[in-house]
Amino acid sequence: MDPTTPTLPEPAPAPERPRYGLTGLEPDAGGSGRPFGTPPDHGEPAQQSFFKRRIAPIGAAILAFLAKIKSIILLLPKLKLLTTAGTMAVSVVAYATIWGFPFAVGFVVLLLVHELGHVIALRREGIRASLPMFIPFLGAVISARSLGDNAAAEARVGLAGPVLARSARPPAFRSGTPPATTSGGRWRSPDSS
């Protein structure tokens, strides 16, 4: 070399870095025979537990489903028809626990027809009324604005429920005489043998 040419000093050796363990990305320096990038074998079985393989994905799917329908669940009270149907179902279940399913369904339908009579009369008077909301063991309720000082309109609205409910009563009661007993599932009048 030419003595006038400056030379750079030799680089200092890199300090020894502590080893924290194999990451699985090191080249196969130890000659273990495993391919580059595979995790080291620590003697654990490769098979996951039953919970991780079967139960966890089902739970994740349920959570995803609930997350998707949360807006529908939050909007249910705003849908008035579903509110009426839901409170009807609760009332049927409540009445059925005491008096049986056929009576419960008939009674709740009769309450519905009665309340719809009030709703129809209110709408004929030009007042918006809500659909009925059922309250078990108390009946049903609708909400509407007051008719003010118009007593005749109040009377028409008040009578519309019972009038419509009377027209919807079962045919067995239309004769004016309620049936006394039953025989083989059919109604018998008190004067027949």
Image: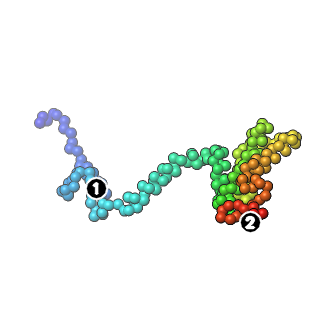
Mark 2, residue position: 193
Q: Nearer the viewer, residue 70 or 16?
A: 70
- Going by the numbered disc 2, the residue's amino acid type is Ser
Question: Relative to residue 76, is residue 40 drawn left or right?
Answer: left
Q: Residue at x 30, y 63 (%)?
A: 45
Q: How far is mark 2 from mark 1, CA to CA?
A: 92 Å
User: Which residue lies at the image location 52% right of the left edge and 51% below the top edge?
Assistant: 66
**Residue 5 rendering spot, x and y as whole percentages:** 16, 34
Q: Nearer the viewer, residue 111 or 15?
A: 111
The answer to whether residue 169 is above or below residue 189 is above
Say above or below: 135 vs 148: below
Question: Could you tell me the amino acid type at mark 1?
Answer: Pro
* Residue that numbered label 1 is attached to: 39
Mark 2 residue element: loop
Q: Position of residue 118 (x, y in %)?
A: 77, 45
Residue 91, horizontal then vertical, whole percent: 67, 57
Q: Is residue 114 visible?
A: no
In which quadrant is the N terminus drawn? top left
Seen in the image, is 97 located left or right of residue 58?
right
Q: Residue at x 69, y 52 (%)?
A: 109
Near mark 1 (Cα within 10 A), the count class, few <14, some 14-19 or many ≥20, is few
Q: Which mark is residue 3?
A: none
Secondary structure at numbered mark 1: loop
